[in-house]
Image (cartoon, rainbow, N blue to C red):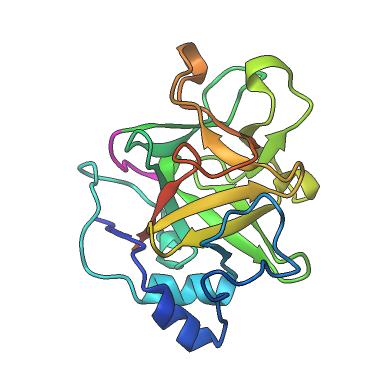
């Protein structure tokens, strides 16, 4: 049976290994820091993420009996996301009817298999990640053209990666939390805890700040 371990990291050790330094407390923002990114949150690239996953501790994450992660989950960039707001794992709703087929929702009480698994694929040219769902092998897109409560929802529906499928990954060492920012609209991914109906707990790129609803735990699939 596959196991899942939490991505708990010491960013100080990570920075020492990567020779990447964070700004000192009170220092002026770096020139490349978007205005919406709060102090304390730092970008994480592929080398840093690999270092994190290789140095996680041995605590086992909550699993469902008989989980069925595929053999490709041996790769360290394969992760599960858990909302800090409701403690539930993000799943791909691949059986939802159109137009919400493949929508992402933080609704699973435990990790039970590929529906809650994602491949974080790094692109060196753009310094961004694309998220590929293990449930349907499709890339996660931000639905900017949707309207109403579904606007900017995240759906695993793309066979290739373009601007709609690019995300920046951030980590906060003090809070030990992660956040995703869409490059399509510059907004952070939020879990809609107060929604009701079929889109309850849906993920949407719609926040200009990181304030709890935008924070996630990451777990490695091993």
Q: Is residue 191 above or below residue 183?
A: above
- The answer to which of 31 and 126 lies nearer the viewer is 31
Q: Is 118 displayed left or right of 29 in the figure?
A: left
Residue 194: quadrant of the picture: top left
Horizontal and vertical percent position of residue 179: 52, 51
Horizontal and vertical percent position of residue 81: 43, 47
Residue 158: quadrant of the picture: top right
Which image quarter is the N terminus in?
A: bottom left
> Magenta residues, as a range?
109-113
Q: What residue do we see at 25% from left, 53% from top?
A: 61
Residue 43: quadrant of the picture: bottom right
Q: Main secondary structure of the magenta part?
A: loop
- The answer to which of 189 and 67 lies nearer the viewer is 189
Does the magenta-highlighted stretch encompass residue 18?
no
Horizontal and vertical percent position of residue 80: 41, 50
Horizontal and vertical percent position of residue 186: 72, 46
Q: What residue do we see at 37% from left, 42% from top?
A: 84
Q: Is 7 displayed left or right of 146 in the figure?
A: left
Q: Residue furthest front?
A: 26
Q: Is residue 207 above or below residue 18?
A: above
């Amino acid at each position: 049976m596959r196991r899942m371990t939490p991505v708990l990291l010491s960013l100080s050790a990570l920075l020492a290994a990567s020779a990447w330094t964070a700004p000192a407390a009170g220092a002026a923002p770096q020139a490349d820091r978007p205005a919406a990114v709060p102090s304390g949150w730092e970008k994480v690239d592929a080398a840093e993420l690999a270092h994190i996953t290789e140095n996680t501790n041995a605590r086992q994450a909550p699993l469902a009996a008989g989980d069925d992660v595929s053999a490709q989950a041996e790769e360290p960039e394969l992760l599960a996301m858990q909302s800090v707001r409701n403690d539930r794992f993000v799943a791909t709703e691949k059986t939802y009817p159109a137009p919400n087929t493949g929508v992402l929702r933080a609704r699973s009480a435990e990790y039970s298999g590929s529906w809650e698994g994602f491949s974080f694929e790094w692109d060196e040219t753009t310094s961004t990640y694309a998220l590929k769902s293990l449930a349907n092998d499709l890339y996660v897109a931000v639905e900017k053209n949707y309207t109403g409560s579904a606007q900017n929802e995240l759906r695993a529906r793309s066979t290739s990666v373009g601007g709609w499928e690019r995300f920046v990954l951030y980590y906060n060492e003090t809070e030990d939390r992660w956040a995703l920012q869409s490059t399509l609209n510059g907004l952070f991914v939020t879990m809609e805890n107060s929604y009701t109906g079929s889109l309850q707990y849906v993920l949407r790129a719609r926040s200009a700040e990181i304030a709890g609803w935008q924070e996630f735990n990451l777990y490695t699939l091993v």
